Amino acid sequence: MVNTPHISYWSDLVISQSLETGEWVLLSAHMPGRPPERIGILLRDPLDGLHVKLRMDWTHFILDEAEIEIWRAMREDLEQKGKDVGGHCLLDWLEHTASHSLQIGARERVEVSDAQTIVDELYQRHVESMTVFRCQRNAT
């Protein structure tokens, strides 16, 4: 007789494996008369929390001080909305409404063990490295 595991073991296993996967999107700013700028990363963790990492150097591509303040306040606003409605709902909302100055890329799945480390790595790879590349290219 074959001893089969209890069904709750398998459902617990599936649930624990799915809880390790999150998703992230790249945020970009599309200002009139300027090329698009990568400005940050949104990471939805396995528990539907939202982690936001945005650039801090707004003055290099936005000249109006009032607009700079709006962009600076965006991080706190996104974080609060993520807490209010959850990361999944906020990403859904952004996918349907962000289409002009602020745009998001396609969602990509990522394994999340430490959300802050992952968001920092994604930011460095997809935002910070492109800013450095653009600055170096413009200097030559």
Image (tube, helix red, strand yellow):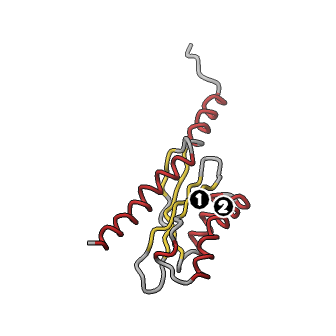
| 7 relative to 94, above or below | above
Say which residue appears at 55% left-offset and 41% top-offset: 113
Looking at the picture, tell me which residue is in the foreground, 54 or 91: 54
Residue at horizontal 34%, vertical 65%?
133
Is 29 located above or below residue 114 in the figure? below
**In the structure shown, which secondary structural element does the residue marked by tag 2 occupy?**
helix
Residue type, mark 1 in image = Val
Q: Which residue is mark 2?
A: 79
Query: At which x and y percent is residue 7?
Result: 64, 29
> Counting other residues with Cα less than 10 Å from the Cα at mark 2, is it few (<14), some (14-19), or many (20 or more)?
some
User: In what quadrant of the picture does the N terminus appear?
Assistant: top right
Q: Quadrant of residue 96?
A: bottom right
For the residue pair 85 and 116, the one nearer the viewer reads as 116
Residue 111, x across and y down, in percent: 50, 44
The image shows residue 50 at horizontal and vertical percentages of: 63, 56
Q: Circle 1 is placed at which residue position?
A: 52
* Badge 1 element: strand
Quadrant location of the C terminus in the rendered image: bottom left
Measuring 51% from the left and 79% from the top, which residue is drawn there? 62
Whether residues under marks 1 and 2 lie with C-beta atoms below 8 angstroms apart, the answer is yes
Q: Which residue appears at 71% of the width and 61% of the height?
A: 85
In the displayed structure, does residue 120 sit left or right of residue 97? left
State the image quarter where residue 73 is shown.
Answer: bottom right
